[in-house]
Image: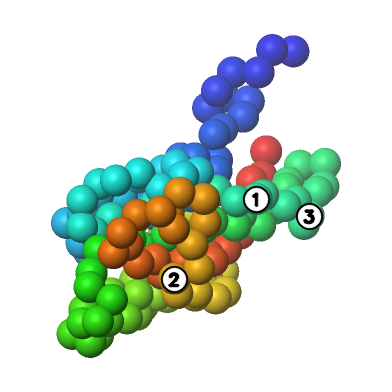
Amino acid sequence: MALVLDTSYGNVFYKNVLVKLRSIITTDRACKVYISPFYQDHGSYSIRLWGASAETDIMLASEWRKLYSVVIALYSMGDDNDEAFYEQFYSDAERLYQLLYNNNEAGSTALSWYDGVVNDITFDEFEGDEEAVDSLHVARLSFSCRINRTD
């Protein structure tokens, strides 16, 4: 039997996790939120989302449940010697954490996530091309959530 998008399967990770996260963040903040595995220059403040993994933790004949893990990278440009910049940078990371905490359940429709949690936050641990960008700072949040699908 052929698979038909939104009939016999859905693009759950992209539509129900990544796009939903982007919507939640942009509702709170007017900034560029993009989905990419790598840093892209979008000015002095941006947020990158990347789906890191999906793990099936329940599989039954008529239902599955997956744990989705997302890397959320908050990028900000600032002077390394400016304490006021760091105060704002840490404040922005805390605000993003609180926003995700407040949205630990994303809706009440089919394929809405629950158990949304930020597992950890790291600061200025650069990956790939990030290190080569002058004055770039990154707060990286590890977010996970669960989604059930019942056929």
76 w.r.t. 86: above or below? above
Discs 3, 2 touching: Cβ within 8 Å: no
**Residue 69 placement: quadrant:** bottom right
Give the residue at mark 1. 53
Give the residue at mark 3. 58
Q: Earlier in the sequence, mark 3 or mark 2?
A: 3
Q: Look at label 3 and name its amino acid.
A: Ile
Image x and y of residue 65, in percent: 70, 53
Image x and y of residue 136, in percent: 32, 62
Identify the image quadrant of the C terminus.
top right
Q: Look at label 1 and name its amino acid.
A: Ser
Q: Earlier in the sequence, mark 2 or mark 1?
A: 1
**Which is in the foreground here, disc 1 or disc 3?**
1
**Label 1 secondary element:** strand
Q: Nearer the viewer, residue 106 or 69?
A: 69
Instruction: Kindly report the distance in space between the C-alpha atoms of the residues bearing marks 3 and 2.
Output: 36 Å
Q: Earlier in the sequence, mark 1 or mark 3?
A: 1
Q: Look at label 2 and name its amino acid.
A: Asp
Report the residue at 24% width, 82% height from top: 81
**Which is in the foreground here, disc 3 or disc 2?**
2
Image x and y of residue 16, in percent: 48, 46
Q: Nearer the viewer, residue 111 or 85?
A: 85
Image x and y of residue 114, in percent: 54, 64
**Label 2 secondary element:** loop
Give residue 124's mark. Answer: 2
Discs 1, 3 touching: Cβ within 8 Å: no
